[in-house]
Image (cartoon, rainbow, N blue to C red):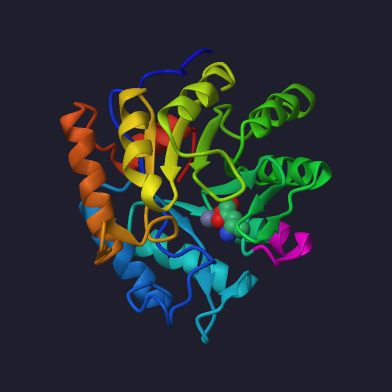
Amino acid sequence: GPVGPRSSGTLITVAPTGAEHRKSDVPNLPVTLAELVSTAQDCERVGAGMIHVHIRDAAAQPTLDLGLLTETVAALRAETNLVVQLSTGGAVTDPESDRLRVLDALPDSASCTMGTVNFGDDVFMNRWEFIVELHQRMRDRGIVPEYEIFDLGQLASLHRLLDKHGLPAGGHVHVDLVMGVPGGMPGDVQTLVAALRLLPEGASFSATGIGRTSLPVMLAALSAGGHLRVGMEDTLSYAKGEPVRDNAQLVARAAGLARIAQRPPLSADEVRALLGAAR
Ligand code: KMH
Ligand code: ZN
């Protein structure tokens, strides 16, 4: 469809950590399980409905350790009502086998990146057969995918995936446009509009703009009837020359803009209904 369904409320996803920033550079980045849970609670209180999770090991390095992921999913379920989405993207250096194994932690949702993209000085590799494997394993496990789109051609790949391999668990297609990655699509209104023309019929979408594209992408997504992702994975500056204090600060700003747009934040249960996710 041209724009996808207009939702009366806004899904706000918080992506609090990512795999790219170093704890030594960003001391307020949540890296321990306790920091992650307390961040999640703060973000839920101010309007987040879903959390996109990357975890770190005891040395604050990115890890896809299955035990730690399983423990993290359990803790977030126990301490929040947020929809728990694990990243299968991991860090650019993570092998496919580790990224597939993330699904064995049985999160509510998981990311599924729809193609290979230059990622700053690195390459974020996502082969077609790997994408198909992720899609099928998620469906086998009843995990709702979020298709991550870094460039427009990846939306054509999403059509191909759904045509050849069918709808995901829950029967609903949700897409996240990750805009402004150096090597991917730019984070501006024109590109957002172009992406919306390529969305599958009936799909919902969120958008996030990396770095300084955060605000323009957020405002454009809201006005297009879309949903929002914010967080320190994507953005470390709240304003020019002003570092982000914490993830809740970014969620609170997104929630305020969503209310101004008269599409207030969706509760976690409303997000489950939107995505077709069970709990
Ligand atoms: N860390 C990036 C290489 C995802 O979470 O699925 C990929 C990423 C996407 O963050
Ligand atoms: Zn991520």
Q: Relative to the observer, which residue lies in front, 183 or 160? A: 183
- Residue 6 is left or right of residue 4, and the answer is left
Query: Residue at the location (42% across, 44% down)?
Result: 209
Residue 130 in the magenta stretch? The answer is: no
Q: State left or right for residue 144 relative to residue 138.
A: left
Outermost residue, top side: 1
Q: Nearer the viewer, residue 50 or 221?
A: 221
Image location (x, y in percent) of residue 66? 64, 70
Dominant SS of magenta comes to: helix
Q: Can you see residue 87?
A: no
Residue furthest front in the image: 241
Using the image as rendered, state which of residue 48 and residue 230 is in the foreground.
230
Which picture quadrant has residue 27? bottom left
Residue 154 rendering spot, x and y as whole percentages? 67, 34
Q: Residue at x 29, y 37 (%)?
A: 266
Specify the quadrant of the image occupied by residue 169.
top right
Residue 100 inside the magenta-drawn segment: yes
Residue that appears at 44% across and 50% down: 210
198 to the left or right of 84: right
Q: Residue furthest right?
A: 129
> Is residue 254 found left or right of 174 in the rendered image?
left
Range of magenta residues: 92-101
